[in-house]
Image (spheres, grey):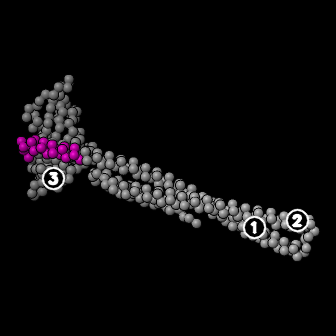
Amino acid sequence: MLEQPVIPIRRHHLIRLSLISFFLLTGCPPDNTPLIEENDQLKERIVKQESMMTTLQEGNRVLQEQIDRLNQELRANEDEFGKRLELAQQTGQGLSTEKQNLLQQVTAVTNKNRKLQAETKKLRKQLELTQQTEQGLSGEKKNLIQQITALTQENQKLHADGQKFKNDAQWLRTLRDRFRQSLQVNNQTVKAQTLFHNLPDVTKAALQALANNGYTVMAKMETDQKSVFITERKTSPSPSIELPGYRNQYLMELEAQPDNQTALKVKAQYEEMTPGGTIIGVDADEVAVIERRLIQAIRQILDHPEQKTPGKEIHAPPEEDSEIS
């Protein structure tokens, strides 16, 4: 009895899902070599299955020819001995010896016929089993073709995703370079404030102060020694650090100092907006006031953590692992 080969489909799917998860988490272009090798293996298996199906079909034809020949031989024997027995009885020459021989021959033929019938039945069962195996192989072939089609489509999708990841990575590198250049330019004229708290506590307080005043972090870069945050540009409502009718954006840089101290730089892009939407420049003194108000809000949280107002959680983009220049 032929056994159908079983393909470990679930294991293949788990491997493919693990590969896809790995590539998506690392942000690197996926390696399509395992999918291509799996495609080739499936195609080779289909060729083997087609060869096996051809062999089974040839075996079916041979078995059917044997069954037909045995049936013909069975009918010929029955007709021949039936006629001889009938002729002996009709002519009166049915001597007891000949009659006995004929009866023995008839019995032998009958037994032979029974054996032939049993063998025919066995061959038919074998033929049915072969046909079932052939149907199973045909279904398996169809499944393999579907898997190859799915793998090909998945391979194409991964290739497209990999190209997209490459483009995104290039865009992020360009954005990061611009971001660093902007930091160097903007922070040259900003005077650092020294806070007598360690960098993690000051960072936490700074984010809390931004959240309390309705700011959302647009970009951030953090290491164990330095952190930089840039907020979204916000139009000030009435209860805020700034006055109504103004809009502002903060650039904040924190750097660890010896003795658990932290140097804090705050740069504000403070602008006045007319009711018609026209932007009016604000003098340096007003900008300095807005910067000092944020620093004061951070100091207030650090000095009185139990009195800080709960703010909304700030949703920031993923951290950059590269060191800030």
Task: Note whether 234 is above or below 11 in the view shown.
Answer: above
Q: Mark 3, residues whose alpha carbon is within 10 Å: few (<14), some, or many (≥20)?
A: few
Q: Which residue is mark 3?
A: 323
**Could you tell me which residue is drawn at 10 percent across and 41 percent down?**
186
Q: Which residues are magenta?
A: 169-192
Mark closer to the observer (1, 2): 2
Residue 194, percent across and down?
9, 50
The residue closer to the viewer here, 52 or 164, is 52
Task: Note whether 306 is above or below 89 in the view shown.
Answer: above
Q: Which residue is mark 1?
A: 113
Query: How many numbered markers are drawn?
Result: 3
Q: Secondary structure at mark 1?
A: helix
Report whether residue 80 is seen: yes
Distance from Cα at disc 3 to Cα at disc 2: 113 Å
Q: Which residue is mark 2?
A: 87
**Could you tell me which residue is drawn at 15 percent across and 32 percent down?**
271
The residue closer to the viewer here, 279 or 144, is 144
Q: Earlier in the sequence, mark 1 or mark 3?
A: 1
| Kind of residue at disc 1 | Asn
Mark closer to the observer (1, 3): 1
Q: Secondary structure at mark 3?
A: loop
